[in-house]
Image (spheres, rainbow, N blue to C red):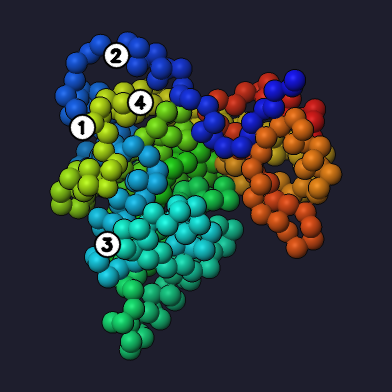
Amino acid sequence: METKRSFVCDYSEGAHPKILERFLETNMVQCPGYGFDTFSISAKNKIKEAVNDQEADVFLLCGGTQTNSTIIATMLKPYEGVVAVTTGHIAVHEAGAVEYTSHKVLTIPGKEGKMEAEVLNTYLKAFFEDGNHDHMVFPGMAYISFPTEYGTVYSKKELEDIHSVCRKWGIPLFIDGARLGYGLCAHGGDVSLGDLKDLCEVFYIGGTKVGALCGEAVVFPHHGAPEHFFTMVKQHGALIAKGRLTGVQFDTLFTDGLYLKIAKNAVNLAIKMKGMFLAKGYSLHMDSPTNQQFIILDDEQMDRISKHALFEIWEPLPDGRTVVRFATSWATTQEDLDFLDKII
């Protein structure tokens, strides 16, 4: 029986071989727990250097859902919620993890998955001008993901504009970087890792989707972490006792630029994949410069391709066709694309 090749997501595989090698090399080294091991300390120092902020507070958490929930819960007051676009990850695919901590996700319209500074400003202005706003959930934070759920990315100017609106109304900007590597390596993008320290109050560097077995690195620029954040990470179940697990992985990912190298390879192959679909007459739902490509398929095409390859069903269209997602990862190869080219 033919083995189907998976283009479902960017975390289908285990971990980058260099990480596995490093695990074996360090396996018998005895370490203190909870991120106080030498590997975690080294990883945090390398991340500070990579983000060009020696004053940054860096924490290693176990996964994306825990990271989103913990950051939002610890930075908001009890009566505050977080503003996101309607297609934002925390609004759609977090199973209510944010609301579970008693903080409402307040949604506003987005454009191609992105938040627009003008729309955010209008929303915040209307809230604070409402004479009854003391009876409402206060917008206490703005949340965006980079890249978005649709593989689109913000320009540096767009991030500056959104951050400016947040500062105007006195709320922090949180950038979900679960796929940050792929966003930073997006074709035509102009945002660097070093830029982020001045564009938000907190962001995280996704490991789970960019070469690690698990783990996310949370960065609070300019020594901006909430008081006792470490304790609250543990309270929210996001702290790993064997902190070396995330420490070894991020120390490896941030040695010799590995993190961005493997992300760039995934993006380059995704752009090739997009070209393959376009060359054969397929349509895009929207044009993504990252590792996620959203293709429109009719029933015949979907049935035919699904016999040989796996992909993600995204959303139905009014005309009966379906938007599906094909994603590359750090582990995708040219051989995988050659295989896909033969069956589409």
Q: Which residue is mark 1?
A: 34
Identify which residue is drawn at 45% across, 54% down: 95
- Whether label 1 touches label 3, CB < 8 Å: no
Separation (CA) of disc 1 from disc 3: 25 Å
Separation (CA) of disc 2 from disc 4: 13 Å
Q: From the top left corner, tell me how far across and down residue 98 is, in percent.
A: 37, 57
Mark 2 or 4, nearer chain start: 2
- For the residues carrying marks 2 and 4, which lies nearer the camera in this image? 2
Q: Which residue is mark 4?
A: 249
Separation (CA) of disc 2 from disc 3: 39 Å
| Residue closer to the observer: 65 or 110 | 65
Secondary structure of residue under mark 3: loop
Identify which residue is drawn at 29% across, 13% down: 27
Residue type at mark 3: give it.
Answer: Leu
Q: From the top left corner, tell me how far across and down residue 45 is, in percent.
A: 24, 31
Identify which residue is drawn at 34% across, 46% down: 67
Mark 4 or 1, nearer chain start: 1
Label count reads 4
Residue type at mark 1: give it.
Answer: Tyr
